[in-house]
Amino acid sequence: MPSLPTTGASEHADPHVFIVGAGASRAACPNGDAEGRRLPVMADLIDVVGLRPLLKQHGIESQEGDFEAVYDGIVQSGNEELASELERRVHHYFSQLELPETATAYDYLLLSLRPIDLVATFNWDPLLAQAFRRHEGKIALPQLAFLHGNVAFGYCAEHRRCGWIDDHCALCGKRFEPTPLLYPTRDKNYTKNPFIRSQWALLEAHIKFAYLLTIFGYRAPETDVAAREAMMGAWKLNETRALAEIELINTQSEEELHANWKDFITRTHYSATDSIKKSYVARHPRRSCDAFAASTLMLRPWEDDWLPERESFNDLRVWVNPLWEEETRLAGTGQQFSGQPCSEHHEA
């Protein structure tokens, strides 16, 4: 994966941080993955992944609700064999998932952000990573952080290197190890594993300076107290928090979303929508923080530049290419982005 390069006139601007949950993967594949396999959320993971027969074999009946709570109970009971088998089966199911060969919500998201920005995901599925890899090397992309591990990503514990699961450590040549996926909810320790610790450090470093914070398909369940506290701790250190905006993308009602995230929201500095295609990055792709600052600080709002609907992810990338070219051209010059809509770049 690429390191954190600078991209033009706004290289010192505060980043746009996306925090992504299971709802985002369902938005990317509403009808299932490329082979029709369903994208589970914690509430239905037991049945979607087919874990109920295994649980019944071990005398665990009528389990409903959050899978992590079920897993926590198993760990607390000391049944290490069952806990290990659950992790194996979960890893196997998610490893099979494949992104469709059409433009998805993840393509829209990645192509709308720059390398100063960050997408931090709680998801185990490989879909975000697969979207990243099909654009990698063709356009500058945001950084990724895998907060709960990911089946597409691995690491070398000895040399503290990480990369795609099919890659090898540059120092020892060994193939990367899979990242851990499951954690007991009553004892979630994001500092124990060096890889997971590095991913949380990356998120916290970006949240401290974020000017736009978008929560996409993530509800911060009550069982994930450690995650919520870690994010809030970093958010409180953000010196521009009073000016920053929180955007909530979810199918929940605005009232439910506000109630869930009110601790993060300053006064009325938030918005809510049900689709990435209605979000601020779709309205101002690759310029979200710049456009928001122009509107709120400079009182000179930019013309809307909506990312168009495209069936082909290649066509979508071609559409945003002029914005990337402007970033490359202005890198290190200190000049400001034009704010010119991408549609005008294509017409020029």
Image: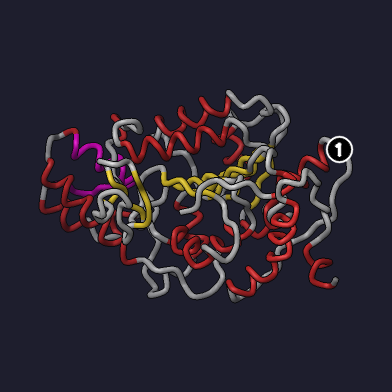
Whether residue 6 appears in this view of the structure is: yes
Q: Is residue 229 above or below residue 258?
A: above
**Mark 1 closeness class: few <14, some 14–19, many ≥20 residues within 10 Å:** few
The location of residue 191, given as percent across then percent down, is 34, 30
Foreground residue among 324 and 290: 324
Say which quarter of the image contains residue 245. Answer: top right
The location of residue 156, given as percent across then percent down, is 28, 46
State the extent of the magenta-drawn residues as a range.
59-75
Give SS at disc 1.
loop
Determine which residue is flagged by label 1.
Answer: 298
User: Does residue 43 appear to the left or right of 263 in the view shown?
Assistant: left
The quarter of the rendered structure image containing the C terminus is bottom right
The location of residue 299, given as percent across then percent down, is 88, 39
Q: Is residue 128 above or below residue 262?
A: below
Residue located 31% across and 35% down the image: 185
Q: Is residue 331 above or below residue 293?
A: below
* Residue 68 part of the magenta segment: yes
Residue located 63% across and 41% down the image: 15
User: Does residue 233 appear to the left or right of 164 in the view shown?
Assistant: right
User: Does residue 208 appear to the left or right of 94 in the view shown?
Assistant: right
Q: Is residue 199 above or below residue 225?
A: below
User: Does residue 5 appear to the left or right of 40 in the view shown?
Assistant: right
Residue located 45% across and 52% down the image: 22
Amino acid bearing label 1: Met
The location of residue 11, given as percent across then percent down, is 68, 43
Whether residue 90 appears in this view of the structure is: no
| Residue furthest right as drawn | 300
Residue located 66% across and 24% down the image: 239
